[in-house]
Image (spheres, grey):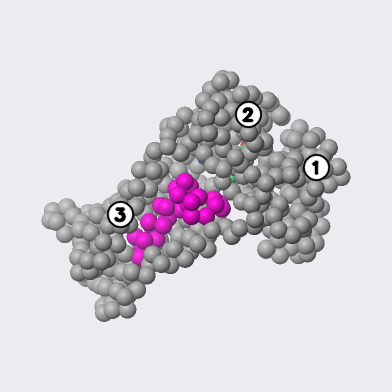
Amino acid sequence: MSRVRPDAPSGLTRVAIAMAVSFLPLLPLALGASDLGDVANLLGLAGAIVMWWQVLLGVRQISHRLGDDRLAAVSLHRWLGGCGAFLVLLHPLLETVVDRQDWAYVLVPDFTWAESAYASLGRLAFLMFLALWLTSTLARYLIGHRVWRYAHYLSYPLLALVFVHSWGLGGYLTETPWLLAYWLGLAVTFAGVVCWRLSVSRWAVPYRLAGVERLSPTVSAYTFRALGRALDPQPGQFCYLRTSLRSRAHPFSVVRGGGKELTFAVKDAGSFTERLRALEPGAVVHLDGPYGTFTRAAQAGPRRPAVLIAGGIGVTPFVELVRRNDDLPLSLVHVVASPQEAVFGAELRRRLGERYQEVVRPDRPAIPVTPRARYFICGSPRFVEATAAGLRASGARRDQLYTERFDC
Ligand SMILES: Cc1cc2nc3c(=O)[nH]c(=O)nc-3n(C[C@H](O)[C@H](O)[C@H](O)COP(=O)(O)OP(=O)(O)OC[C@H]3O[C@@H](n4cnc5c(N)ncnc54)[C@H](O)[C@@H]3O)c2cc1C
């Protein structure tokens, strides 16, 4: 039986309150706004605060401290992207109207004199924002994960430009000393967050590759042993893994944890998983985490049947949950492309008996919906969305569904 923390709130309520408070300094200014120029300035300041929150929530080591549901923080971060887009778009458009300029004013930089140079920093930030917004929304699935990720790094210089732009142009900031102090506080915390984000070595812990086992034609299990401090994930949680301090971190659910060792089951996907396969025994990797609250509700609170539904490698968050909770009313449906891909099938069948069901595509799982059950769905975004939609169509309430997409 695993140790389970009580069914704590996700922490997002705390974040929402903190966000509301962070906008309060703009309230007296909004109440005193007298013309369109004031409104344009205020929208710019509000857009900067939204972007500040976006950066904070995008850095997992920070958002984790605000609330431990990493994927909910990512959703909020995305949602703010939409709001930010609206404010960031309106701000230069209104400024253009107020200054009676033509539309080129929004885009064409002019560094010939001081005020115009500060305004141009805003234009550069605006162009970066457009690139960021496009690669995160309309073009998200047209470009690869890597391009999307690199485009995301624009958010750091972008926000730095926004701070310099707003400080240089003055407006409310020069007229209102307490607002300037607040603004500097935001800028300093932003700089601190960026430094924290870049100092990977301070928060990633080293592990050594202790063993590799091929579980199926496409999935390998990697066991790592802590070289110093060990992470202590709960069932269903994931950690970020990087093969060197400078490489990108990738998330993987823990299939066996506790003590000094952690095991991940990794499906061959692209260049990172290929690098993992090339690791020699004894190679040092860096892990950070654990993150996630996906299966917490299955173990906490009143006992309710939990139906675990996995698409392919999406079974990984459920393995340790089943292993450590043989007294819970769990059942598992594993949907796979071929019987060989049903990794952990033998163990799960042994533990769950008839409550384990393996479904080979194109067959569809028959999952009865009952009002008391909770449904935990994990796999590719497409699998999760289709399965959740199917359950909803069969009468499942939204609050009965818990999802984790193997994507970000
Ligand atoms: C919470 C979570 C838990 C996961 N657990 C597992 C697991 O237990 N086993 C497993 O095999 N896979 C898991 N994944 C998916 C795994 O992270 C990706 O397959 C892996 O990062 C692919 O990297 P790649 O370079 O080999 O492939 P790529 O070809 O670069 O990527 C293949 C796909 O994986 C996703 N991906 C790529 N990089 C990242 C990243 N840094 N963060 C998130 N998604 C990414 C993208 O959707 C991409 O299209 C999990 C993903 C998430 C979000």
Give the Cα separation between the discs numbered 1 and 3.
Answer: 53 Å
**Rendered location of residue 337, percent (x, y):** 73, 39
In the picture, measured across the screen, residue 64 lies left or right of residue 297, that is left
Q: Quadrant of ligand 1?
A: top right
**Rendered location of residue 214, percent (x, y):** 69, 26
Residue position for label 3 = 187
Within 10 Å of the Cα at label 1, are there few (<14), some (14-19), or many (20+) other Cα atoms? some
- In the structure shown, which secondary structural element does the residue marked by tag 2 occupy? strand
C-beta proximity under 8 Å, tags 1 and 3: no
Residue position for label 2 = 223
Q: Which dot, 1 or 3, sits closer to the camera? A: 3
Q: Amino acid at mark 1?
A: Glu
Q: Please tell me which residue lies in front, 408 or 131.
A: 408
**Rendered location of residue 104, percent (x, y):** 25, 60
Of label 1 and label 2, which has the lower sequence position? 2
Residue position for label 1 = 358
